Image (tube, rainbow, N blue to C red):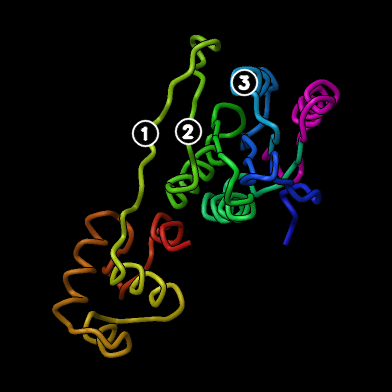
Amino acid sequence: MENFISETPQMPVGGGEIMGKKVLIATLYSPEPVILATTRLGPERLILLIDNEPSKEQEASLKLIEDSLGKVIEVKVVKTEVYDIVKVATKCVDIIDMQPKEDVIYVNITSGRKTKAIGLLFAAYARHEKVKKIAYNPEEDKTSVVYLPRLSFHLTDSQKKILEMVDKGKFENTADLATKADMSQAMVYKAIDELKDMDLVVTEEGIKLTDAGKIAGL
């Protein structure tokens, strides 16, 4: 797995507790939104999401940021898929999980393709407890900042177990799932009904996860 954090261990300040760093995870295409977000937030680590095969514009933006911001803060680059939201979200969850627990994580989804921004947004939902704020800079006024709600999937243990099992196996109906999950059919039926209402599963042709369901189970 890629290393998304500094190799240098954090040292206690004055012999006390370890102080966390501000971390900004941002999509990248044009440099302005990232530079604005970095200037306002003042992070010590900037993690930029670019395409697996970046365009010339993206490469130019990255070079500009590395040549300017990279002189004063730690800048890391992570390549992701462009159009597969689940793969983008999975990579972003990995990034979030690999930050030291003391760090404070911020997310900015302004720059880059919408699919990449949605993937990062869903990853923030999947790791609600680890993300401090989610920001977006409106195209109409690039100097303003809109803070998006920090939503969470709020899954119960039963719902999490069902998502995990459906992700790994095939189930034709709730009775089949209840037997293999060692849960009552009534409990499984209730959980499936709730997951359908959240658009995390579909049951038209057996029980299957939606893309959102795959992300919620990360």
Residue at the farthest front position:
15
Mark with earlier residue (1, 3): 3
Mark 1: give few (<14), some (14-19) or many (20+) Cα within 10 Å.
few
Q: Percent x, y for residue 25?
A: 61, 37
Residue stretch rendered in magenta on the structure: 48-74
| Quadrant containing the N terminus in the rendered view | bottom right
Other residues around mark 3 within 10 Å, as few (<14) / some (14–19) / many (≥20): many
Give the Cα separation between the discs numbered 1 and 3.
19 Å
Amino acid type for the residue under numbered disc 3: Pro
Where is residue 3? Give x, y as percent: 75, 54
Q: Is residue 198 left or right of residue 72?
A: left
Label 1 vs label 2: CA separation?
Answer: 7 Å
Q: Which residue is mark 1?
A: 149
Hey, what amino acid is under mark 2? Ile
214 or 11, nearer to the observer: 11
Please say whether residue 51 is one of the residues in the magenta stretch: yes
Residue found at the far left of this picture: 186
Q: Are marks 1 and 2 in contact (CB under 8 Å)?
A: yes
- First in residue order: circle 1 vs circle 2: 2
Query: Magenta stretch: residue 214 in it?
Result: no
Which element type, helix, strand or loop, lies under badge 1? loop
Q: Position of residue 106 (x, y in %)?
A: 55, 35
Percent across and percent down for residue 145 are 48, 18
Residue under label 2, please give it. 134
Mark 1 or mark 3, which is nearer to you?
1
Q: Is residue 1 left or right of residue 198?
A: right
Label 3 belongs to which residue? 33
Please name the residue shown 69% across and 34% down the image.
46
Label 2 or label 3, whichever lies nearer to me, is 2
Name which residue type carries label 1: Pro
Element assignment for label 3: helix
| Residue at the spot 76% in from the left edge and 44% down from the top edge | 53
